[in-house]
Amino acid sequence: MSEKKQTEQDKFLAPENKKHTVIGPDGEEIQVDPLNDYFCTDLPKVEAPYKGVLEKFLNWARAESLWVLSYGTGCGSIELPPLFSPRFDAYRFGVAMRPTPRQSGVLIISGYLAVKTLKRVIRSYEQMQNPKYVIALGSCTINGGMYWDSYNTINRLDHYLPVDVYIAGCMPRPEAILAGFNKLKERIKSGNAEGANEYIEKLEWYKANQKKIIKDWNMPTYNW
Amino acid sequence: MNIFPRIVFVLLGLFIVLNWGLIMAGIIRKIIARLGMRRGIKVFQPYINLIKNYSIRSQLSHGVMFYLGPVFRLSGGVGIFLFMPLIYGSDYWSNFSFTGDLILITYFMFFGMLGMALGAGEGGHPYSAIGISRGLAQFTAIEVPMTLAILSIAIQYQTLSISEIVAAQQGGIQNWTMVTNPLATIAAMLSFLGAMGHSPFNVVMAPQENPVGPPTEYHGTFLGVLQTNRAILHVIEAVLYMNLFFGGASNWGVLIIKTFLIYFWSVFVGMVFPRFRVDQSIPWFLKIPLVIGIAAIVVFII
Amino acid sequence: MFPEADEQGMPVMDLDSQKYIKIWQGPNHPGVTGNMSLELTISGDEIMHAKTHVGYLHRGFEKLFERRRYIQCFPTCIRMCVPEPDINEYNLARGTELLAGIDVPPMADWIRMLVLEMARLQVLLRMVPGQAGTIGLGLGAQWGLYYRELILDRFEELTGGRIYHMYILPGGVRGLLPDGFKDRLEDNLKKVESFMKDIDRLIYSNAVFKKRTKGIGIIPNDWIEPYGITGPVARAAGYQTDIRLDYPYLFYNQLEFDYNLEHESDVFARFRVRRKDVDTTVDLLRQIMAKMPDKGDFKAETPNVLHWKVPKGETIVRCESSRGEYTFYMVADGSMYPRRINLRGPSYTHAVAVLEKLLINANISDVSPIMVSLATCPPEIER
Amino acid sequence: MNELIDHIKARFPIYDVIESQPGQIFVSLEASKLIPMITSLKTNHGFTVLVIFTAVDWIEDDKFQITYVLNNPKEKQDLGIRVFIHRDDATMESIHHLWKHAATFQRELKEMFGIDFPGSPGVDDPFLLEGWDNIPPMRRDFDTKKYSEETYFPRPGRETNDPATFMKQMLYPDD
């Protein structure tokens, strides 16, 4: 990393992530560079799927048990609570909400993404475990929709994350979201939903796009 | 009985308990859904979730203890199972029950918690740490009335063997501890609410206040092990209460019905109450159930 | 043990001293209302310092309005407050009418009032049972969403949209009520009333709920004006404010209702005020249906909206949303595009200045009840 | 309301007094007189609530208009005060000591318009944007469409029609 880029990165670092000295319990001074010491700097590897009937069976289980990260990124999140209410009841289809990215397999991008949110979405996505799927809700994730000329919202999500299913509309009705879930299930069962591996294979391209718009990239390249 | 057939029956019993635990979780979720005017999940959804969790391809580890946390938790659950007599009067289904098993089982109930706490602490997530401190503090408070109730029963029946306690309750509902020692039963059933992790005592793993407590960092196979343990633990703790207070079971059918009803008691309360903060739940346990527990002992000493 | 403060009044907290942990609640935290985050420094379970971070939903609406004609602003502006979009439509329409000097036929005003109150009921049905969901009683929220769907059905019948309606336009509304609409709405109101009785039993007389919410998040009376606190939060402190009564717009002066006041000013008092608001809203809907005319002109003549030059001027328009005073500031420069449309919603102060202050010394488990009681809605802060 | 205006007029040089609605008056004022005037309004005349605090960019006059709308909850009156400052080197006196939430408004104005309020707490902290390196976005010389097209990979295929010309094309193609 060049000298200039280094100072640029330091400018945006949170105070606790800057290089500093920690005094240990026995009075020893320890130099800490949190970005390298506290975070994992390795890059992920492609995890090849199994072959044959076993993978088919596992894909069936993955499709029938979709754990969604409860992260309402945009206005589409107003239609997510009704999805789990008496009228629509997505639990019937094995869809459930999980509050932590480690345990969830589906990331719903509910609407437009401001740049500041995109950064958190990328972190959440990378913290989820392979295999993982992305559902993009609303026209604004497809081509910018209502906010196509806004200076702070992205226009196409597929340049930053691999998207499995798009659900068009502004905003999509719960029925449309349920249909989207069923589409995702079909895709998983047919073995085509390898977005996580695709992301790792094209990591450089995705990272270049992400870093182009996230000007204050103050985190490791891949956030485990 | 010879040791090898006994091991086979223990494994078979573990398999039955695990399956009943998963199906019970499904049925309970279904009932909760009906209460909320929904159709709810499929009854077999817990199985699918379990398979899915074991099928996650990538696993992250935060160190050796992080691996061992779920293992400790599972060995805590299986440990309770190993020394718990399941069916009264059956030599095949009394596992490794011996004369002092009540003490060992109360120890195993805490063992899993501690192991999990060490493992989750290594995860490094602040919410894990908050959840652990809440969980251990609350569980200590839960244990007090529970232990008092167990002591009361031990004094009442003059034994520390679960099999003998069950044997003493045979011969009709009027011999159950529930009738002969109601104070101890009340104290124990109140502490059961806390042990099962439903409202109002689930601030440890509350999704809103503290997502989601100790298991925040656990995923994939680790989470699968935790889920397996939960299925076993819920049934086996209900079996413990059934043996101590509700006359035990003379066959599998009775066991299934009684464990379901005992477990449903905690769900039933949990549905209509929000959760306490941890600084409210600990005083609660140290007030009403504690007083009832002490009274239960005093009655039998006098 | 409270940390020392430096000369600017900010607490000095050395994270390496192991006494404090810094944790982030949000943006993906189920206990935080919407997409915003709180940076909390805690010691034990007690919060020492809180800072709100907003901007996760910033779309630059006020910049986009510079590039949109007045009529094009409508589909955009309703997305500024997602849970309750109709107040945006009304404010923008009313502001445009005031600037352009258009008189609205009375029938349109009655229908607007009906739509606004239905929107308020829709929000409250989500919010009133949902507030118990933040402390673990999700059953009421499930039921509440079912009854909210009934109101959304009426919206769908009237406007064709579930969440975003675009029904109120400058000069009036898009159409009259369909046949039998009032009967169906009355039917739904009856269901809502009986549901509210269940909610009273399930939530408001629940001992644990009271124990969790009483005595936390108290807003002193002398904060209200300096912090610009409005709506139910101010009314829970005994401060008489309701835009519908103070600055009557539409035909609110022909309806009979009163301020819903509480005096404890804690989280429970704010929840009580919202509960009373449901009754008021149901009552107001009945009054509106009884008093509104059956037929009439529903739209005034407006110039061709694509060539509409609104004369130079500026104005502020306000209405009462379910969360408090909702104000638009509009400046026209005589062209076809608005010069500036600025929105100031109640969350702008509730979620930033008030919340940061209110969370100090609170228990970390109480963050989400306090946030929900302030009814923060991030999109209207960020726009 | 008119008495109030007469009263203020006697003490402060206000001009451009416009009554936009009943009970709602907008006045203009010199920037240096603002703090004494709103302090007096707040303490003596009951204008205790700050409703709107925002800026308008009049790029053709090379000026920023800062608008303060104060509300008198007792008399139900609104008074909007317009203050004009130069666009380059835009600085205004801070009012964070009068209203607690004014600092939030000032933080936003600093970020969105580049108007500085020296002394306001946390005014330099980013509020809505993160890592922004362009001119403040709400200034009128910032072209949001151009920025979006250059930065965010527009998906090909979107056709944008100016509604007026499009309508003309569709309805009267021969003209």
Image: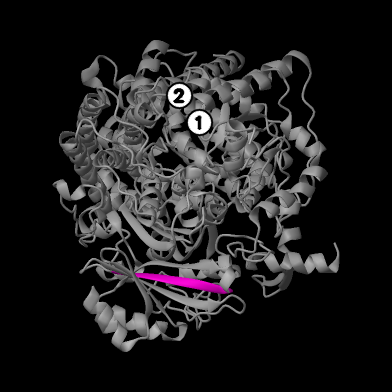
- Amino acid type of the residue that numbered disc 2 sits on in the rendered structure: Ala
Q: Which residue is mark 1?
A: B230
Which element carries disc 1, helix, strand or loop? helix
Q: Outermost residue, right direction? A: A2
Task: Output the chain of dot 1.
Answer: B
In the rendered view of the protein, which quadrant contains the N terminus of chain C?
bottom left
Measured from the top left, where is residue B63 in percent x and y? 69, 47
Horizontal side of residue B50 vs B39, given as left or right = right
User: Magenta stretch?
Assistant: D62-71
Crowd class of label 1 (few under 14; some 14 to 19; many from 20; radius 10 Å) = many
Point 81% across, 39% down: residue: A202
The relative height of residue B229 versus residue C13 in the rendered view (above or below) is: above
Q: Which residue is mark 2?
A: B25
Measured from the top left, where is residue C68 in percent x and y? 54, 49
For residue A145, the mark is none
Corner quadrant of residue B164: top left
- Amino acid type of the residue that numbered disc 1 sits on in the rendered structure: Arg
Residue C241 seen in the figure: yes
Point 30% across, 79% down: residue: D41
Task: Output the chain of dot 2.
Answer: B
Overall secondary structure of the magenta stretch?
Answer: strand
Q: Outermost residue, left direction? A: C256
